[in-house]
Amino acid sequence: MCGIVGYLGEKEKKAILLEGLQELEYRGYDSAGIAIIEHHQLKHYKAIGKLSNLKEKTKHFTSTGFGISIGHTRWATHGKPTELNAHPHIGAYSYVVHNGIIENYQLLKAQLIQEGITFVTQTDTEVIVHLFEHHSKQTSTPFEAFEKTIGQLEGAYAILLISELAPDTIFFAKNGSPMLVGFEGDDVYFASSDTPIIGRAKEVHYLADGEYGYATNQAVALFDATGTKAFTKQPLPTDKALAQKDGYRFFMEKEIYEQSHIISETMMGRVLEETIHFEELEENFFDGISAIKICACGTSYHSALAASYLFERMVKVRCSVEIASEFRYKEPLLTHDTLFVTISQSGETADTLKALKMAKQAGLKSLSICNVDNSSIVRESDCAILTRAGIEKGVASTKAFATQTMVLWMLALTMGEHKQTITPTTLAQEITAMRQTPKSLQVTDRLHAKLNRLSKRYLHGHGFFFIGRDIFYPLALEGALKLKEISYLHAEGYPAGEMKHGPIALADSRLFTIALMPKSMHYEKIKSNVEELSARDTTICAISPEPFELADDFIQTHFSTHPMLEFFEMMVITQLLALEISVRLGNDVDMPRNLAKSVTVE
Ligand code: F6R
């Protein structure tokens, strides 16, 4: 996810910007840039790759005296991670940095092109700076032009804009993407999160959606749709490490909580009123495709398995899923009517990459679903869809899984629409459900406290079974993987109907069963599977909207008619349960033993 910093004042600006961007590195980025106006002179520097490249480019530059400055680390969403696409974006006399996605940028861009404006990047952001300059020709103040500009933007944004028209002013606006304003004497700071300004600003105002304004060394003014507003300043936290985790104890915990918000980024600009649109896919992308093969590892493999149910049910195409390390040595039969899909958070997993190369060599069309743009898997694929989860720091994958599953659900609907295997009514119902996903992913204090309380009962015993049916079977696999990764307890995921074919032999009071019992899918079937386990004295933790009297522990979820909403809600519960058990066992949640975040070896 992109990071933004800004500074207005007398201090040396380059150092403040670069150090600030360094603090935002954890958000992930593929290019960076800064722009400064002082003594009426405009300067900017951009570089792809690490911040060290930008530092090298700016090593002979220092700023002096009063000035305004903005900086940005970019996590590519529209357009490749090139220097041209890096922020700040430049108009004739203004610069902008932006975090988020402008959903209506294509429309605005088309209008501006008609006015004779030339665009030089592939980004959605560039439209902001041109729109501002376009309006500033007709308005009496630059601030009016800025107000008009943000009034036309749809989507999510945190924006800082500077212009030679107002060389002592930083314009700012926030809607959907994070930004705060820091204060210290006459100095004003902006940032995407606390860390860049800890130790610099004393007080902070966390901008709310819809707030915007301007800062000069005379005044900082705040507005929203109702008019002028007062800042609600609060003291800044002083602990940087804690601030990086946004106050959460672990990155994994933060990442579980942020799923509800992140999933909207995954959908943004893609889930439209009546259809789902991936601008990454050409119109005829699915032509000639009558089968899908998905290859992935670990958690990504689990999202693939869940998707295979959706593809066969909704698109009526054969969908096979293979663990990449198995696929590569089995001499697989590949046919040209098969779309080869790879799924990877990192985009660097050696086995998945090799599987992709094999499929390409066999002449298959390839699509990757990935969280890291310009990664090896993305570069190697014919086409890539980014999950937009932002950098995932916890080794145990959480938000990557949620966003992969969401992209796959969206993809199944897109393909179903293309192949006319789903009706417009079904599509509309699916989109309605999809829009409720952020709610299903929310963690309430009550739920978290309950899982914390429950966790103390699951520290011993001789193992866990996670069971589920249909898409809840891959979720059971994923729940078991999460638990074993960070608790080091033995856990298996099983299709509920398979227990009586062997695993039930392990059943006794020291066997823990985490039963995924959605109401919208095969409830009665799974209920009887759980009853069989209960009859063997297994300790049952049931997760369901429907109270289940045989459960030793019961975690109640919300009733929902759509299985995917139940899926996402139960996913959060299994993630948090694993986390709380791991914490009680005193393990390092973010860096579990023996594991690496990116597995670049066979
Ligand atoms: C589990 C986990 C791993 C990865 C696997 C594949 O929490 O993170 O199982 O899912 O190593 O990695 P990617 O998705 O980067 O290809």
Image (cartoon, rainbow, N blue to C red):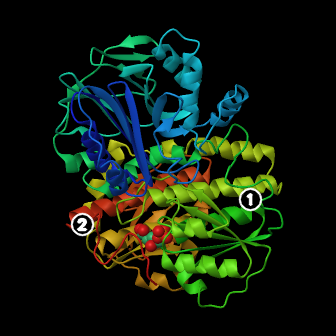
> Can you tell which mark lies on residue 588?
2
Q: Which of the two discs, 2 and 1, labels the residue nearer the N terminus? A: 1
Q: How many angstroms separate mark 2 from mark 1 (CA)?
A: 41 Å
Residue occupying the point 69% across, 37% down: 273
Q: Is residue 39 above or below residue 106?
A: above
In this rendering, the label closer to the viewer, 2 or 1: 2
Q: Is residue 424 left or right of residue 572?
A: right
Question: Looking at the picture, which amino acid does disc 1 mark?
Answer: Met
Can you give x and y, in whole percent of width and height, for residue 67 in the image?
A: 30, 27
Residue occupying the point 67% across, 61% down: 310
The front one of 166 and 281 is 166
Residue that sits furthest to the top in the current view: 140
Q: Is residue 469 in view?
A: no
Q: Is residue 295 left or right of residue 545?
A: right
Query: Which quadrant of the structure image shows residue 154?
Result: top right
Label 1: which secondary element: helix
Q: Is residue 320 in view?
A: yes
- Residue hosting label 1: 314
Question: Looking at the picture, which amino acid does disc 2 mark?
Answer: Asp
Can you give x and y, in whole percent of width and height, for residue 331 in the image?
A: 66, 91
Residue occupying the point 38% across, 22% down: 167
Can you give x and y, in whole percent of width and height, for residue 568 in the image?
A: 51, 53
Q: Is residue 282 above or below residue 495?
A: above
Q: Is residue 301 above or below residue 602?
A: above
Residue occupying the point 39% across, 27% down: 208
Query: Which quadrant of the structure image shows residue 239?
Result: top left
Q: Is residue 414 above or below residue 366?
A: above
